[in-house]
Amino acid sequence: MIQTRRQLILEILLNIIKMSQILIIKNKIKKFNKTILVSGDKSLSIRWVLLASQAIGKSKSYNLLMSEDVLAALDCIKRLGIKVNIRKGHCEIIGNGINGFKYKKNLVLNAKNSGTLGRLLLGLLIKSPQKIKLIGDKSLSKRDFSRVTLPLSKFGAKFYYKTNNKLPLTILGSQSVKGIQYLEDKGSAQCKSSIMLAAINALGTTSIKARKSRNHSELLFKYLKIPIKIRKTKKYDFINIEKPKKIKAFNYKIPGDISSSAFFMVLTTLSTNSKLLIKGVNINSSRIGIIIILKKMGAKILLKNQRNYRGEKISDILIKSSNNLKSINCPSELNSSAIDEFLIIFLAAAKAKGISYFKDIAELNQKESPRLKWGSKILNMMGIKTELTKNSIKIYGQPDLKITKSITIKNYLKDHRVFMMSTIAALTFGGQWKIHDKDSINTSFPSFLKIIKKIKNKSL
Ligand code: S3P
């Protein structure tokens, strides 16, 4: 009897928690004119944590993204014996030098939701003298890890899986690590960076032939004076890396994340008579697919106050509403520079006149959720026709679409970008939306809903 009452109370509590995790949107956003800041870039935040862990002495970062993915990175290096201090306004990492990890037997590291963390971290562990187990959350445990463990095995590291190529896995490093030759043919910066991090432990040269993808690791290696040579051709980058003697501690101010900004670019583009200035965003040319694609569709986007920071390009971005977007036949050369932005780009295509076509994007189904499928599913729920294949989507835009029905979004593996796309869809197309798992935004952009509130409040 007591047990049953307890169970009942527990059930009620769980339901209350579940309900509080549902975002309800019933009205479109009114016109606005605002200036915002988005939080720090996720790719750079994780790279700073991992590289600072290999430096000698105290590195500091400012504007480090304090999201679950980055906190998981800090937790992993702490478990590997690296000291981390989170201070007011900055974060400190006190490294012990290259491969200076100190840890006990049976270590378990949890990459949680982050493919970037899980895959890059393995690169740093190829000399681990003891077995280390790597685990992740439900979403990460569905993703392929052979894309990094196959090339990392060439360095001599051993990997043991329970289930084929999926987490959890165990790594055992090798003590005689020599440089390898590696062809990265997916356009994956995670794979490229994992091998680059392994290369700082390897004697001799590691040579990577990589399809174009984001180049933050290369820019950081150059800034840190890690011996790196890069030759670029139209399709591939040829990267040679030598083992550095040491890495000096370094301070870094993380710029705003263009992938987070993307949601607000589309929010403004699809709203009426509105204007938004996003300050201090990283506009690295390997990341600006979203700007190029939206501009091709007729969006009004202006880059202001451009400056350089340690090889990265930073800018303020001014966006104005646009009421006549046109469809796009998206060139696949832009895919890698917009890889995390396709969901929100699909939403712009839903509002554009004509049929948009995105091809060679099978990689989207390898993300936190099968995003190509989810993008299509949400558009269909909104009343937009799509034609989906394994690696492409056609979107039949409806510039005058006004949603009046109810739409519920749930069971999407808590993919942060599915949540944010749905929120922007609700605010720009109307309808009554119930979007489950609000806390999914904590992965990459915990302040997303606060910024939405700020934009909504003092409308013009
Ligand atoms: C990332 C690379 C991309 C991207 C991910 C972050 C990185 O993944 O989707 O969100 O920081 O290197 P792939 O390299 O697997 O395409």
Image (cartoon, helix red, strand yellow):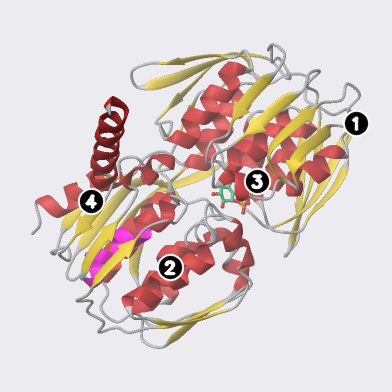
Residue 334 makes an appearance in the image: yes
Q: Which mark is residue 345?
A: 2
**C-alpha separation, residue under disc 4 versus residue under disc 2:** 19 Å
Q: Going by the image, does 452 lie left or right of 134?
A: left
Q: Going by the image, does 34 lie left or right of 349?
A: left
**C-alpha separation, residue under disc 3 versus residue under disc 2:** 22 Å
Measuring 77% from the left and 22% from the top, which residue is drawn there?
A: 131
- Give SS at disc 4: helix
Q: Nearer the viewer, residue 388 or 293?
A: 388
Measuring 60% from the left and 75% from the top, which residue is drawn there?
A: 359
Label 3, on which residue? 190
What's the magenta bit mostly, secondary-structure-wise? helix
Q: Nearer the viewer, residue 387 or 455?
A: 387
Residue 83 among those drawn in magenta: no
Q: Is mark 4 within 8 Å of ligand 1?
A: no
Label 1, on which residue? 178
Q: In the image, is residue 208 above or below residue 134?
A: below
Residue 227 makes an appearance in the image: no
